[in-house]
């Protein structure tokens, strides 16, 4: 945003559909390093192979196609185009999050081999976001708790592509009474609704009250919010919005 939104910097667009050449170079680097492999599994295959992990709907890939021979790959390629997965190493990944502290993931059990390029040729989120952030000079990533489990995959991509790793800070989510994450697709949380029912000051004050940094549920200007904001005081549990 500070550099002009969609205009990008210099001759490089910020529109992901116009950055394929950058993703292609990164993908070729992973491929030449033997870090990715073709996967011929369909969505139906994946659903049948494993139940969702925990309660978050994530299904770690079991590595079905990881050890296919060249002959097996050639035979399967006659039936369908492959996606490409990053081969996760065994063992644990530990990193320090700015809000949740030390986080440890078993890279095979919790993450599994993940897609970096889909069967239709498009590049997946994990690869695109790492390339974008690295080339744009992002040094601090602040985002929702629902993306905490993406951090091990992204750290490995930073290292494999020889990029400097950013620091990470994950925020608790605003959730409904049923525990569902609020999103712009939900009525009452999109920008149109918020602009119609809240002033900017009212919205800032309300959010600061929800996280415990505003004593009363009353409007705040941004400078006031910044003056009392303390990242160390941010709650770790998701916040229910009534």
Image: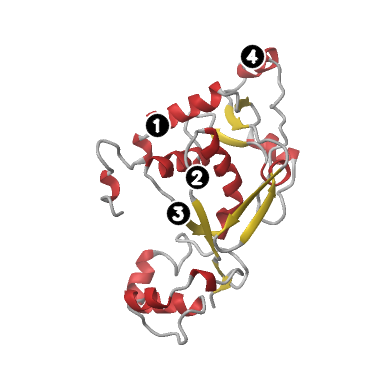
- First in sequence: mark 3 vs mark 1: 1
In the displayed structure, 152 sits above or below 219; it is above
Q: Nearer the viewer, residue 106 or 78?
A: 106
- First in sequence: mark 3 vs mark 4: 4
Name the residue that disc number 1 marks. Answer: 22
Question: Distance of mark 3 from mark 2, alpha carbons?
Answer: 9 Å
- First in sequence: mark 2 vs mark 4: 4
Q: Residue at (25%, 50%) from the top-left corner?
A: 4
Circle 2 Cα neighbour tier, 10 Å, few/some/many (<14 / 14–19 / ≥20): some
Name the residue that disc number 3 marks. Answer: 140
Question: Distance of mark 1 from mark 2, alpha carbons?
Answer: 18 Å
Image disc number at residue 165: 2
Image disc number at residue 74: 4
146 sits left or right of 17 in the view: right
- First in sequence: mark 4 vs mark 1: 1
Q: Nearer the viewer, residue 177 or 226?
A: 226
Q: Nearer the viewer, mark 2 or mark 4?
A: 2
Q: Nearer the viewer, mark 3 or mark 1?
A: 3
Quadrant for the N terminus, please: bottom left
Q: Residue at (72%, 54%) from the top-left corner?
A: 54
- SS under mark 2: loop
Q: Nearer the viewer, residue 213 or 56?
A: 213
Question: Distance of mark 2 from mark 4, alpha carbons?
Answer: 36 Å
49 sits left or right of 144 in the view: right
Circle 1 Cα neighbour tier, 10 Å, few/some/many (<14 / 14–19 / ≥20): some
Question: Distance of mark 3 from mark 1, alpha carbons?
Answer: 21 Å
- First in sequence: mark 1 vs mark 2: 1
């Amino acid at each position: 945003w500070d550099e002009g939104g969609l205009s990008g910097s210099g001759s490089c667009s910020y529109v992901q559909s116009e950055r394929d050449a950058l993703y292609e170079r990164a993908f070729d680097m992973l491929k030449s390093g033997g870090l990715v492999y073709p996967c011929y599994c369909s969505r139906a295959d994946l659903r049948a192979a494993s139940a969702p992990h925990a309660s978050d709907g994530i299904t770690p890939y079991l590595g079905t196609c990881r050890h296919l021979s060249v002959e097996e790959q050639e035979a399967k390629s006659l039936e369908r185009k492959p996606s490409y997965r990053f081969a996760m190493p065994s063992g644990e990944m530990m990193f320090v999050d700015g809000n949740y502290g030390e986080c440890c993931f078993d890279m095979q059990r919790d993450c599994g081999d993940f897609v970096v390029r889909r069967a239709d040729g498009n590049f997946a989120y994990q690869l695109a976001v790492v390339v974008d952030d690295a080339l744009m000079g992002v040094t601090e990533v602040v985002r929702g708790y629902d993306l905490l489990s993406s951090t091990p995959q992204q750290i490995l991509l930073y290292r494999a592509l020889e990029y400097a790793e950013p620091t990470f800070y994950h925020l608790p989510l605003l959730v409904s009474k049923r525990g569902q994450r609020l999103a712009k697709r939900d009525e009452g949380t999109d920008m149109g609704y918020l602009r119609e029912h809240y002033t900017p000051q009212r919205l800032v004050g309300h959010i600061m009250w929800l996280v415990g940094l505003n004593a009363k549920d009353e409007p705040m200007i941004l400078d006031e919010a910044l003056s009392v904001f303390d990242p160390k005081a941010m709650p770790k549990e998701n916040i229910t919005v009534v």
